């Protein structure tokens, strides 16, 4: 449960995500440090991690690979993925559950070590509300 | 490496995140994403990309800017120091003031116009960073 890419320095929680290559499960990790950061922010942010992130990783509406940047940087190429979906809920700052935000999607970003390092709401594509706006420009390819 | 069932994962997240600390403006460098996240209000937010470096967080409740994500920090510092070696003075022993990162990016953009969103948003982020005296210890600049 607490193993990770750098066990000596950071601890990680492990959860399940769908693997776009074969549709089977793979594991994704989230660092304790990241979770503690959310705790100092708000109950709402903590609950997004606890309850929304797994939904998106396990039942995404799309998975993109290769975060486009202007400069050529391999670290942002293959293996860096964005899972996208519309969860059935959102949370206010005090942690109260509420309906999801209209016209928005939830994105979870993972690196090539299968570590989820960022997640958030973004505006949805007006032509396909299951996808983020400008997805054609932002990612190199759509895997799912 | 065993993946936790979702209910157990949620319990662990709630346990690890538990704290009595009140909210304070915070910046955090995350080596997993090589990014600096700066949040100065606790509201739930949505994100919009400002440019290649910065994504801005807007409050879901007020629409105001409440934070930002700076991506590719190592590469950014390297590029800035190559093109503007004078920034070595403000990138002090790997500790970087956030307003200096915003300023470096703003100065590096040749396409910016006074009516651009970036012209309004960067000063807001710089003011918020300055008020919170946010310094990121990234060890790579």
Image: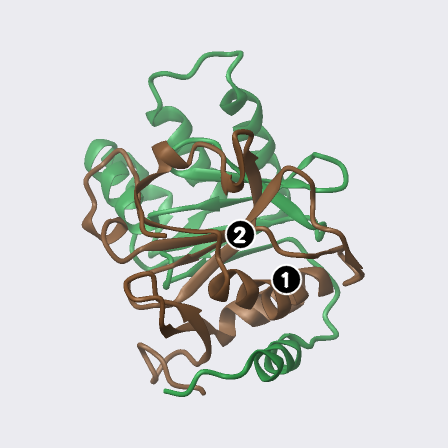
Vertical comparison of B22 with B57: above or below: below
Output the letter for the chain in green.
Answer: B
Vertical comparison of A17 with B39: above or below: below
Q: Mark 2, residues whose alpha carbon is within 10 Å: few (<14), some, or many (≥20)?
A: many
| Chain letter of the residue beneath label 2 in the structure image | A
User: Mark 2: which secondary structure?
Assistant: strand
Left or right relative to A60: residue A51: right
Q: CA distance from mark 2 to mark 1?
A: 13 Å
User: Mark 1: which secondary structure?
Assistant: helix
Left or right relative to A28: residue B124: right
Q: Are marks 2 and 1 in contact (CB under 8 Å)?
A: no
Q: Which quarter of the rendering shows the N terminus of chain A?
A: bottom left
Identify the residue position indicated by label 2 in the image: A85
Same chain, labels 2 and 1: yes
- Chain A image colour: brown
Residue A125, position in %: x, y? 52, 33
Vertical comparison of A19 with B130: above or below: below
Residue at 29% over, 66% down: A22
Residue at 56% over, 64% down: A55
Residue B7, position in %: x, y? 62, 81
Residue at 53% over, 52% down: A85
Is residue A86 something one can see in this rendering? yes
Between B107 and B1, the one lying in front of the other is: B1
Res B27 → quadrant: bottom right
Q: Earlier in the sequence, mark 2 or mark 1?
A: 1
Between A116 and A99, the one lying in front of the other is: A99
Residue B6, position in %: x, y? 57, 78
In the rendering, which numbered label is found on residue A48? 1
């Amino acid at each position: 449960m607490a193993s990770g890419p750098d066990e000596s320095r950071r601890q990680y929680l492990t959860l399940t995500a769908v693997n776009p290559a074969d549709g089977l499960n793979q594991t994704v990790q989230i660092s304790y440090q990241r979770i503690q950061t959310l705790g100092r922010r708000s109950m709402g942010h903590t609950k997004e991690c606890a309850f929304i992130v797994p939904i998106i990783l396990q039942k995404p509406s799309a998975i993109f690979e290769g975060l486009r940047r202007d400069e050529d940087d391999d670290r942002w190429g293959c293996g860096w993925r964005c899972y996208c979906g519309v969860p059935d809920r959102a949370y206010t700052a005090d942690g109260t559950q509420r309906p999801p935000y209209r016209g928005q999607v939830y994105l979870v970003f993972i690196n090539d070590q299968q570590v989820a390092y960022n997640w958030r709401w973004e505006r949805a594509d007006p032509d396909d509300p299951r996808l983020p706006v400008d997805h054609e420009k932002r990612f190199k390819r759509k895997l799912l | 490496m065993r993946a936790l069932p979702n209910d157990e994962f949620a319990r662990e997240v709630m346990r690890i995140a538990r704290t009595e600390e009140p909210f304070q403006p915070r910046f955090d460098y995350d080596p997993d994403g090589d990014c600096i996240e700066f949040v100065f209000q606790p509201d739930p937010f949505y994100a919009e990309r400002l440019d290649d470096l910065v994504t801005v967080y807007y409050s879901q409740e007020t629409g105001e800017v409440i934070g930002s994500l700076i991506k590719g920090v190592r590469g950014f510092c390297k590029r800035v120091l190559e093109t503007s070696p004078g920034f070595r003075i403000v990138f002090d022993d790997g500790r970087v003031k956030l307003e200096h990162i915003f300023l470096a990016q703003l100065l590096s953009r040749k396409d910016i116009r006074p009516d651009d969103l970036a012209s309004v948003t960067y000063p807001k982020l710089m003011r918020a960073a300055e008020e919170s005296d946010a310094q990121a210890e990234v060890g790579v600049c």
